[in-house]
């Protein structure tokens, strides 16, 4: 990427220093007002790797966030999550017309949650693996709820550092994450147009894949392949499908495969071994096992029903 710098930010304090902010009141956790952050305005792109978690509610006026090969505007407020060691970049406008961002940024170093229940569960929240285009778009009411939680966290480490502070802050973080989980569930349901396009794309992609005659060489499509073709992350697609259809991506792949197997079993005279091979299975036993798990019949029993 031309004219870009790569920053590895290891600590919360390093982030504050990089952004010309006062030293953090706590070395392992910080709530930052985005309006206080001044980034360069030379039109260049900055790339980052962070060794800590970040959760941000951001309104952006003159910068775009890049994830992969795509640029995204954040003019409307969105909630975005980053886990340690994820790479992201920011492309700045050449002309700054006021605060670059408004909103807040919560930084959480893994050492802060070490040996707590949250350390074991935080990566179970799939949205830490979502791409920028899969960020959470909040309603005004939802934004107010999260703003209140963030203020509780800020007040706790600002005024009450004692032997209960960590437990109280972690409880607030868990509440924030659980509300985010709820709001994502709502987004999967309410963003009907975008989600409908993904479902249509999945159906078309699987139909096209299984209608071609090169399954022998290609094998069955993987979840990673499907996600890349639909331009969404693996975890986002899985959660979206679970909410909207009750099935995982893998189950959708298997359903389309079984539909194709039924078609071949009922309309051709090919042997079950030949059909299994054409559908990308190296072993007949694997095909027969999957077919029976999905239909409660063996391939032979299914074919016999048409005779």
Image (spheres, rainbow, N blue to C red):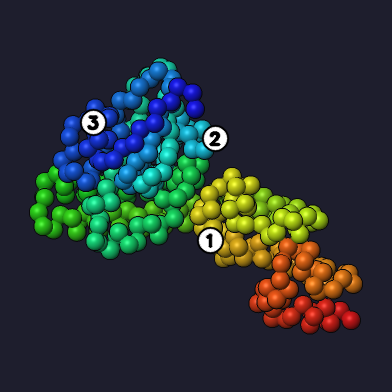
Sequence-wise first label, 3 or 1: 3
- In front: label 3 or label 1: 3
Whether 50 is drawn above or below 112: the answer is above
Say which residue appears at 67% left-offset and 77% top-offset: 289
Q: Tag 2 or tag 3, which sits nearer the N-term?
A: 3
The percent coordinates of residue 296 (x first, y second) are: 69, 81
Q: Pointer 3: what residue? A: 17
Q: Secondary structure at mark 2?
A: loop
Q: Residues within 10 Å of mark 3 (few under 14, many from 20)?
A: few
Residue 191 lies left or right of residue 138; in this view the side is: right
Which residue is painted at 58% across and 53% down in the image? Answer: 224
Residue 116 percent coordinates (x, y) = 25, 61
Residue 222 percent location from the top left of the image: 62, 57
Q: Position of residue 273 (x, y in %)?
A: 80, 72
Mark linked to residue 306:
none
Residue, x 47% and y 48% (percent of image)? 130
Give the Cα separation between the discs numbered 2 and 1.
28 Å
Marks 3 & 2, CB-CB < 8 Å contact: no
Left or right of 147, for residue 139:
right
Q: Residue at x 38, y 20 (%)?
A: 41
**SS type, badge 1:** helix
Q: Is residue 207 visible?
A: no
Query: Is residue 158 positioned above or below 213 on the image?
Result: above
How far apart marks 3 and 2 lie (CA) works out to 29 Å
Read off the residue under disc 2. Answer: 69
Q: CA distance from mark 3 to mark 1?
A: 42 Å
Q: Is residue 270 visible?
A: yes
Q: Mark 2 or 1, which is nearer the eye?
A: 2
Label 3 element class: helix
Q: Residues within 10 Å of mark 1 (few under 14, many from 20)?
A: some
Per the rendering, the mark at residue 243 is 1
């Amino acid at each position: 990427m031309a004219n870009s710098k790569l920053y590895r930010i290891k600590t919360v304090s390093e982030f504050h220093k990089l952004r010309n902010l006062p030293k953090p009141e706590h070395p392992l956790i910080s709530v930052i007002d985005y309006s206080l952050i001044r980034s360069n305005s030379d039109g260049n792109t900055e790339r980052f790797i962070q060794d800590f978690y970040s959760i941000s509610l951001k309104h952006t006026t003159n910068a775009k966030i890049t994830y992969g090969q795509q640029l995204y505007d954040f003019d409307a407020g969105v909630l975005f999550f980053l886990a340690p060691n994820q790479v992201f970049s920011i492309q700045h406008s050449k002309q700054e017309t006021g605060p670059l961002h408004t909103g807040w940024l919560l930084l959480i170093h893994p050492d802060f949650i070490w040996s707590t229940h949250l350390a074991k569960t935080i990566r179970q929240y799939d949205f830490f693996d979502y791409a920028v285009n899969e960020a959470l778009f909040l309603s005004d009411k939802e934004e107010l709820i999260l703003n209140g939680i963030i203020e509780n966290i800020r007040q706790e480490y600002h005024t009450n550092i004692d032997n209960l502070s960590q437990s109280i802050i972690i409880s607030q973080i868990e509440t924030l994450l659980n509300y985010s989980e709820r709001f994502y569930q709502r987004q999967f349901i309410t963003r009907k147009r975008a989600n409908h396009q993904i479902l249509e794309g999945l159906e078309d992609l699987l139909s096209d894949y299984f209608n071609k005659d090169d399954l022998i060489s290609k094998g069955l499509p993987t979840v990673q392949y499907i996600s890349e073709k639909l331009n969404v992350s693996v975890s986002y697609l899985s959660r979206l499908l679970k909410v909207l259809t009750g099935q995982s991506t893998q189950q959708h792949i298997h359903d389309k495969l079984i539909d194709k197997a039924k078609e071949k079993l009922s309309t051709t005279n090919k042997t079950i071994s030949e059909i299994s091979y054409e559908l990308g299975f190296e072993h007949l036993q694997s095909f027969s096992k999957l077919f029976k798990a999905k239909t409660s019949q063996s391939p032979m029993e299914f074919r016999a029903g048409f005779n």
